[in-house]
Amino acid sequence: MHRNRSGTDRRYGGLRQRDGRSCPGGRVRSGWRAVLAAAALGMACVAAAPDPGWGVPSQCPGEDDTARVQHALDSFRHVRLDRSYDVRSVSIEGVNRTIDFGGHTLNGVDETPEAEAVLLLRGRALTLRDVRVNANYRYRAAVRWHSVRTRDPAQYNKIFGMHLSKARVGILYGAFEDPVDAPQSENTITGLTFRCVQTCLHVNQPNGFLYIANSVLDCNPFEWKRDRPGEFDDAEARILNLVRGHVEVANSELLKTSTQKGCMAEIAAGTLKLANCHFECGGSAFLLRGGSLDAANLSGLTNNDSVPVVDVTETAQGGLSLLTNCRFRRMLAVSRYSGMPAFRGAAGGSHRLALTSAVLDGWRPERLSSPPEMVSAVQVYFRFVEADGTVREESLAAPPFPGP
């Protein structure tokens, strides 16, 4: 029989007694069968390497759903949920594992104030499918994706399908404060959706990279205001709060349409990259306190005449944002043209925007940016309505950024 250094049956991923002898039953048993066999004979067994087969939580021992689900996640290399489970909090760790939610949901039931998250993602090279988490308006986040140690980063993970609901924060990537400085990178999500989530993504991870594709990032309240009146904060709702790190979103839709308060995405440091995306928002689309925004083939619709598309604060010093082949549109029926610049910065600020091959529907050329020197524009076209109701088009060519 092949054994590893701990004496555990390597072929079967089985269990062994604390005294080193094989588990009872006439043959080596694995996973929950080994635990049940040992319990029947009054023997204490300890978990070893995950079983190479598929584990089902309902067939695992435990006094409640939390224990059963966690036992499956700890004992099997591959886990398949066979129904929805009510859990306090469970974690997925290890390397090269597959977890298939099968369309079932982890429902958070911990009523402890400021409970951390329903699901903790700490593993490496994980493959997760059809993940569904309902935080039930509790918890600080539905999912916390983080590295426990610098030498053991939560990276190279792939998620195919994830739906998060009823949460203050959908995904906490890193930590709210003092994240572990680890290369938490090469992580991807395809098919990410939200419902009743105030902040879809809160990213605070040094050397953190997250890639999202074919998704709908929606921070509208939906039934939250009906279920918990007065708790949802329209001004603080975001699809993204980027404190530190790098986020790329491709072929996706970004939505904050229920209010004109606040902004859709806020960047304090790091980079947000958007490719082939569309956004709709009632307030300012992007608030830059630092870092940068890089966008290509981005289209956006806004209906608020009192805020810009991109708002750059005085704290954003020395950065450069690149916007290429973009189209920003205001409903021309709202007013003939916007009285607010499309791009607004602070006087004396040093952040710059390079705008190339863009169309601004609902702005006149003189309303491109304030201050004017903040934006360098090449091949930019403006469409707006004249006093007589005719739609007029103008183009603008500007010199490069002025020197110091």
Image (tube, rainbow, N blue to C red):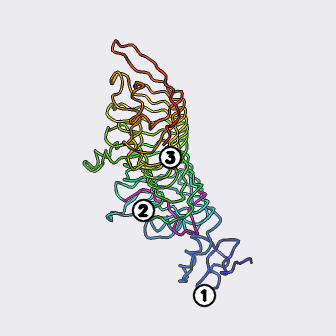
Viewer-side label of 1, 3: 3
The first of marks 2 and 1 along the sequence is 1
Q: How many numbered circles are shown?
A: 3
Residue 276, position as x, y percentages in the image: 55, 36
226 vs 207: above or below: above
Name the residue nearer the viewer: 200 or 44: 200
Specify the principal SS of the magenta part. Answer: loop
In whole angstroms, how far apart are the C-alphas of marks 3 and 2? 33 Å
Looking at the rendered structure, the kind of residue marked 3 is Leu
Residue 272: numbered disc: 3
Residue 55, position as x, y percentages in the image: 58, 63
Looking at the rendered structure, the kind of residue marked 1 is Asp
The stretch of residues the image draws in magenta is 139-157
271 vs 389: above or below: below
Quadrant in which residue 77 is drawn: bottom right
In whole angstroms, how far apart are the C-alphas of marks 2 and 1? 33 Å
At 46% from the left and 57% from the top, the residue drawn is: 204
In whole angstroms, how far apart are the C-alphas of marks 1 and 3? 54 Å
At 43% from the left and 60% from the top, the residue drawn is: 118
Q: Pointer 2: what residue? A: 87
Q: Does 254 appear in magenta?
A: no
| Neighbour tally class for label 2: few under 14, some 14-19, many 20 plus, Cα within 10 Å | many
Residue 125: numbered disc: none
